[in-house]
Image (cartoon, rainbow, N blue to C red):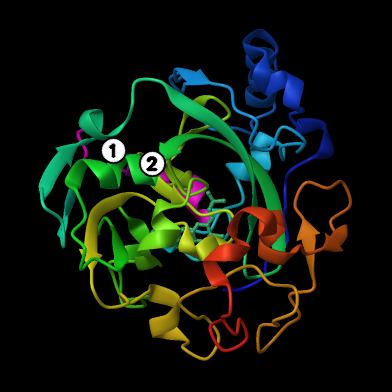
C-alpha cells in the first residue's frame, strides 16, 4: 500500500452535498466537468432509495475524489488506475455463490440479492494508509442476505471473494502480480450481522462506478478500508477464521480484525490521525476516532478483547 498524493483534481471540481442531492444541478456539474475533460462519460442509473439517519451529520467527500482516488489492485496499484482501467469490467449479468455452513446454499443472481428499495447511508471510510473520505453509499444490510441462506449454528465467520477475470481486470495480467488472486476477506459472524455492515450497490444515489467495486461490495465502516472487499462473487460461512489478502501478504502489519484504532499504530506509521481527502489543502489532517467514530455502536463486539493483540 503505497502512499500517493491526489493529483489533477482542481478545487473547482468539488461537488458539494446539495449538488448530488439535486439531480439537475448534478447534471450541470457533471456537464461542466465533462467539458473540462475531467470525468469519464458513463451515465449511471439512479437507484431507488430511502433516506436514513446514518451519517446525517457528515459532509460527503466530493464525488470526483471518491470515484477518482481508489484502491482496487485488480485494476492496478496506482490510485488513478481503477478509474482508468475498470470500465472494461462486465458487471451484468452477475451472480454470487453463497455456501458453506448454511441450510440453503444458493447461487443468486444480483437481482435476487438486492432489495428493490435500498438505503442511503453516509459513512466514514478510513484507509489503513492514513487517509479518509466520507462516502454516501446506497446499500442494504448484509444480515438480510445472510438470513436468506440460513446460517447453521456451527458458522462462526463469513468469507468473501472478489472476481478473478484477467481478461477484464488489467491488474491481474502480466508477470508482476502484487497480490494472489482472488482478493479475499473475512468477518466474524457477529460483525457480519451487525446493522452497520452493508453490501453497497451505489454511491451518491446512483449505481456504483466499476472502480468502487461494482456491482456489489462490502462496507464495514469501523474497520480499515481493505476489509470492504469489492466486486464480490462468493460468500462462504465457515467455522474457522478465513484468510484475508493483506494478512497473507504482510501478517505482522495487517490483522484479521483491522478495527480503526488511533491507539494501535501500524508498524511503519502512526494511526493517530488521518489525511482528509478533498479537505481543501492536501495536508489537512484530523484526529482518527476509535472504531472510526462508530464506537458507541460496535464496542460491545470486542468487550474484553486486547485490541493490540487482535489488531
Ligand atoms: N477486491 C478488492 N477490494 C478492495 C481493494 C482491492 O484492492 N481489491 N482495496 C481495498 C482498500 S485498501 C480500500 S481503502 C477500499 C477503497 O474503496 P473505494 O475505492 O471505493 O474508496 O477498497 C478495498 N476493497
Ligand atoms: Mo485501504
Location of mark 2 (residue): 214
Q: Farthest residue in the top direction?
A: 24
Name the image quarter holding the C terminus: bottom right
| Residue 4 place in picture, x, y as percent | 68, 66
Task: Mark 1: give few (<14), some (14-19) or many (20+) Cα within 10 Å.
Answer: some
- Does the residue tagged 2 have its C-beta within 8 Å of any atom of ligand 1? no
Q: Which residue is mark 1?
A: 91
Q: Is 116 one of the magenta-colored residues?
A: no
Q: Residue at point 73% right, 75% down?
A: 271
Secondary structure of the residue carrying tag 1 is loop
Label 2 – label 1 distance at C-alpha: 7 Å
10 Å neighbourhood of mark 2: few (<14), some, or many (≥20)?
many
Instruction: Please report contact status of discs 2 and 1: CB closer than 8 Å, yes or no.
Output: yes
The answer to whether residue 278 is left or right of residue 209 is right
Part of the protein shown in magenta: 81-96
Residue 279 falls left or right of residue 43? right
Local secondary structure at mark 2: loop
Asked if residue 25 lies left or right of residue 209, the reply is right
- The percent position of residue 54, horizontal first and vertical second, equals 63, 36
Q: Residue at x 72, y 20 (%)?
A: 19
Q: Which mark is residue 37?
A: none
Q: Could you tell me residue 149's position as x and y percent?
A: 18, 46
- Is 274 located above or below residue 217 in the figure? below
Residue 41 in view, yes or no: no
Question: How many marks do you count on the picture?
Answer: 2
Instruction: Write down the quadrant of residue 266 in the picture.
Output: bottom right
Residue 294 versus residue 27: which sits nearer the camera?
294
- Classify residue 110 by image quadrant: top left
Residue at left 62%, top 70%?
A: 128
Amino acid at each position: 500500500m503505497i502512499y500517493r498524493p491526489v493529483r489533477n483534481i482542481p478545487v473547482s471540481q468539488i461537488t458539494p452535498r446539495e449538488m448530488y442531492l439535486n439531480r439537475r444541478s448534478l447534471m450541470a456539474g457533471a456537464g461542466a466537468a465533462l467539458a473540462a475533460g475531467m470525468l469519464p462519460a458513463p451515465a449511471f442509473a439512479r437507484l431507488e432509495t430511502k433516506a436514513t439517519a446514518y451519517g446525517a451529520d457528515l459532509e460527503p467527500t466530493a464525488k470526483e475524489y471518491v470515484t477518482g482516488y481508489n484502491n482496487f489492485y485488480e485494476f492496478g496499484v496506482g490510485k488513478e488506475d481503477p478509474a482508468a482501467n475498470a470500465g472494461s469490467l462486465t458487471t451484468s449479468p452477475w451472480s454470487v455463490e453463497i455456501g458453506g455452513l448454511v441450510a440453503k446454499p444458493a447461487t443468486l443472481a444480483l437481482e435476487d440479492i438486492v432489495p428493490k428499495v435500498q438505503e442511503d447511508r453516509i459513512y466514514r471510510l478510513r484507509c489503513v494508509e492514513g487517509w479518509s473520505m466520507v462516502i454516501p453509499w446506497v446499500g442494504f444490510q448484509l444480515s438480510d442476505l445472510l438470513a436468506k441462506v440460513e446460517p447453521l449454528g456451527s458458522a462462526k465467520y463469513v468469507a468473501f471473494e472478489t472476481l478473478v477475470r484477467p481478461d477484464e481486470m488489467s491488474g491481474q495480467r502480466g508477470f508482476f502480480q502484487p497480490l494472489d488472486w482472488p482478493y479475499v476477506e473475512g468477518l466474524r459472524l457477529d460483525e457480519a450481522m451487525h446493522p452497520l455492515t452493508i453490501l453497497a450497490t451505489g454511491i451518491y444515489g446512483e449505481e456504483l462506478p466499476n472502480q468502487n467495486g461494482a456491482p456489489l461490495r462490502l462496507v464495514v465502516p469501523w474497520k480499515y478500508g481493505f476489509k470492504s472487499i469489492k466486486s464480490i462473487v462468493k460468500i462462504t460461512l465457515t467455522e474457522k477464521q478465513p484468510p484475508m489478502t493483506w494478512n497473507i501478504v504482510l501478517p505482522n502489519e495487517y490483522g484479521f480484525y483491522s478495527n480503526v484504532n488511533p491507539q494501535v499504530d501500524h508498524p511503519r506509521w502512526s494511526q493517530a490521525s488521518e489525511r482528509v481527502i478533498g479537505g481543501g489543502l492536501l495536508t489537512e489532517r484530523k484526529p482518527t476516532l476509535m472504531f472510526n467514530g462508530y464506537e458507541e455502536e460496535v464496542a460491545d463486539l470486542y468487550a474484553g478483547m486486547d485490541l493490540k493483540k487482535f489488531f
